[in-house]
């Protein structure tokens, strides 16, 4: 086994990789796509070249099926994510603040958490039929867990000093929740949301592929069933773009809540913030 | 030991599960009795029993479990090796990480139809799907934890003039073990989930196929039975792995 260390910084080993990966790293991917384009025959049934993917997507757009599909998928995604944030934070804070509830519901939640989304789909279809609300229920039930777990952890570790401060200032129950608890758990909820967002997108697509109701997932499954391989590849690449866009949006939304970060600015978090956090 | 074990069992929590099962039975027999698509708790357990004794459940359970485990082992080994290679070499990291980031942003589920297109309805399709999806967590965890080995420990290694191989084996990998174990647990759950999905779309065998079959035959009791079995499988495998990883990291400050 040979170990190649950075020649200039050989002292720092293993390497430290803080920050963004350099764009040079796209080279293998770009090279692969170029080779694919050059060597794959245009009518290859299994590996059509990338230019064919674009053509297939254009045909799909021309037949007015691409944009509606994208808009359906994105709508279900954002609806599900909003519900995830609300339900996950509420349940998480409740369980994090109440030891009794946590102990009572713990095993039930632990079991529900391990049920894979795919397994929920047939049962949901039996009960609710092939409907948009069925897909929403399945997506929310299987993708709000990261938010719940993070909110619970955040609510459990609210600093005792802050709660004591609230008591000393004789804040009402509501004011304590709003001014002490919520700001303390926002960073955890944000972290949970960042983990849950890609999962939510995956499960939206999963339900669409499994049930073929609507959306980009349905188009992929349809194209696969009639063996339009270039359409399949084009749509897979498209879901990659959706994934990147979703990550970008979530990152940007995360910036909006930065004022709640303990390290961001001591002045912003009002006079209640403690020196020692 | 036995007393400690008994004390750790969450009896109130288990009582809630029992109560939920009872309430479901009562609901499906009273207010919900006119819904044809629901099945009472008793009917679900009866369906599990019939499916297990006279039906295909045992074989399907074996199929899904074995494919998921085989896929998980392959994915873990591959992910660990790739993660290690990229984590240890700056050149490899510089010239591959951005590509990996782009590939990773493609929702893994989109590859299921691609796999079906390549290999048709077969075990190969199922295994390929399981391996591809469960590859990512161990790969990323190995990569990140190798790169963030505690500086103090690395200084110690330098003071003792440990070779690179020795540093890797004695310092870096043990420090990375807890987060790698967490990632392996995650990918174990993923491998079961994806095996079930692959069986629904790509390979007509196993629990996933049995479940879709029950749904299309409009047999809610059987569909619910499969849901319970799949949930229990996921829960059980997770619990076993958690026990094993606690045992592996028993000397650590922060076990997963």
Image (cartoon, coloured by chain):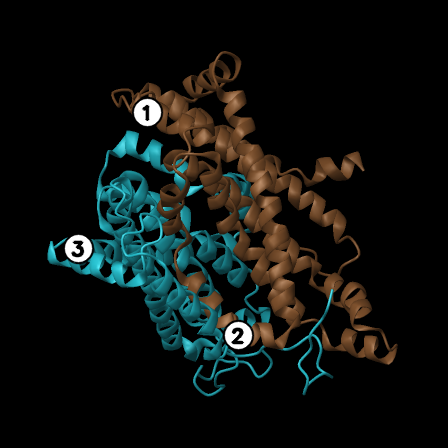
Chain colours: A cyan, B brown
Residue A95 in view here: yes
Contact between marks 2 and 1 (CB within 8 A): the answer is no
The answer to whether residue B112 is left or right of residue B73 is left
Q: Furthest-right residue in view?
A: B160
Q: On the image, numbered disc 2 is attached to which residue?
A: B95
Please tell me which residue lies in front, B102 or B141: B102
Tell which tag, 2 or 1, sits nearer the viewer: 2
SS at badge 3: helix
Q: The C terminus of chain A appears in which quarter of the rendering? A: bottom right
Pick whichever of labels 2 and 1 is earlier in the sequence: 1
* Dot 3 crowding, Cα within 10 Å, few <14, some 14–19, many 20+: some
* Dot 1 crowding, Cα within 10 Å, few <14, some 14–19, many 20+: many
Between the C-alphas of marks 2 and 1, the distance is 54 Å
The answer to whether residue A16 is left or right of residue A247 is right
Instruction: Determine the residue positioned at 65% across, 43% down.
Output: B241
The answer to whether residue A238 is left or right of residue A71 is right
Q: Is residue A201 above or below residue A126?
A: below
Residue A114 in view here: no
Please tell me which residue lies in front, B44 or A152: B44
Q: On the image, numbered disc 1 is attached to which residue?
A: B38
Chain hosting mark 1: B
Chain hosting mark 3: A
SS at badge 2: loop
* Dot 2 crowding, Cα within 10 Å, few <14, some 14–19, many 20+: many
Between the C-alphas of marks 3 and 1, the distance is 39 Å
Between the C-alphas of marks 2 and 3, the distance is 35 Å
Q: Which mark is residue A60?
A: 3
Instruction: Determine the residue positioned at 39% across, 77% down.
Output: A255
SS at badge 1: loop
Q: Which mark is residue A236?
A: none
Contact between marks 2 and 3 (CB within 8 A): the answer is no
Q: Are marks 2 and 1 on the same chain?
A: yes
């Amino acid at each position: 086994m040979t170990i190649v260390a950075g020649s200039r910084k050989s002292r720092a080993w293993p390497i430290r990789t803080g920050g963004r990966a350099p764009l040079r790293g796209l080279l293998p991917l770009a090279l692969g796509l170029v080779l694919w384009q050059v060597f794959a025959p245009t009518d290859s049934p299994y590996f059509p070249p990338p230019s064919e993917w674009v053509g297939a997507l254009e045909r799909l757009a021309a037949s007015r099926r691409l944009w509606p599909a994208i808009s359906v998928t994105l709508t279900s995604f954002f609806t599900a994510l909003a519900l995830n944030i609300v339900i996950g934070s509420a349940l998480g804070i409740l369980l994090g603040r109440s030891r009794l509830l946590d102990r009572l519901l713990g095993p039930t939640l632990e079991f529900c958490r391990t049920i894979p989304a795919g397994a929920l789909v047939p049962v949901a279809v039996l009960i609710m039929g092939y409907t948009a609300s069925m897909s929403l229920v399945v997506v929310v039930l299987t993708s709000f867990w990261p938010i719940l777990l993070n909110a619970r952890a955040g609510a459990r570790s609210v600093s005792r000093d802050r709660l004591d401060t609230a008591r000393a200032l004789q804040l009402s129950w509501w004011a304590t929740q709003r001014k002490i608890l919520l700001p303390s758990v926002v960073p955890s909820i944000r972290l949970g949301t960042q983990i849950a967002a890609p999962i939510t997108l995956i499960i939206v697509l999963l339900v669409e592929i499994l049930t073929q109701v609507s959306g980009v997932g349905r188009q992929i499954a349809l194209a696969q069933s009639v063996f339009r391989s270039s359409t399949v590849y084009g749509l897979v690449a498209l879901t990659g773009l959706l994934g990147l866009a979703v990550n970008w949006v979530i990152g940007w939304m995360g910036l909006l809540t930065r004022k709640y970060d303990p390290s961001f600015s001591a002045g912003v978090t009002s006079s209640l913030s403690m020196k020692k956090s | 030991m036995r007393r400690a074990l008994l004390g750790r069992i969450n009896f109130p929590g288990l009582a809630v599960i029992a109560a939920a099962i009872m309430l479901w039975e009562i609901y499906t027999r009273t207010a919900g009795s006119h819904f044809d698509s629901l099945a009472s708790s008793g009917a679900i357990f009866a369906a599990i029993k019939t499916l297990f004794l006279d039906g295909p459940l045992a074989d399907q359970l074996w199929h899904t479990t074995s494919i998921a485990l085989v896929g998980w082992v392959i994915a873990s080994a591959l992910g660990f090796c790739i993660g290690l290679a990229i984590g240890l070499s700056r050149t490899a990291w510089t010239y591959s990480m951005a590509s990996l980031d782009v590939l990773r942003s493609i929702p893994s589920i989109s590859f299921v139809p691609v796999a079906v297109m390549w290999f048709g309805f077969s075990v190969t399709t199922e295994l390929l799907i399981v391996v591809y999806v469960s590859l990512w967590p161990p790969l990323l965890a190995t990569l990140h934890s190798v790169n963030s080995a505690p500086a103090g420990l690395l200084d110690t290694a330098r003071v003792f003039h440990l070779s690179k191989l020795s540093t890797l084996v004695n310092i870096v990998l043990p420090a990375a073990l807890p987060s790698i174990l967490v990632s392996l647990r995650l990918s174990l759950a993923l491998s079961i989930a994806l095996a079930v999905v692959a069986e629904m779309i790509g390979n007509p065998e196993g629990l996933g196929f049995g479940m879709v079959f029950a749904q299309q035959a409009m047999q809610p009791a059987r569909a619910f039975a499969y849901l319970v079995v799949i949930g229990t499988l996921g829960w059980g495998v997770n619990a076993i792995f958690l026990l094993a990883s606690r045992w592996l990291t028993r000397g650590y400050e922060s076990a997963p």
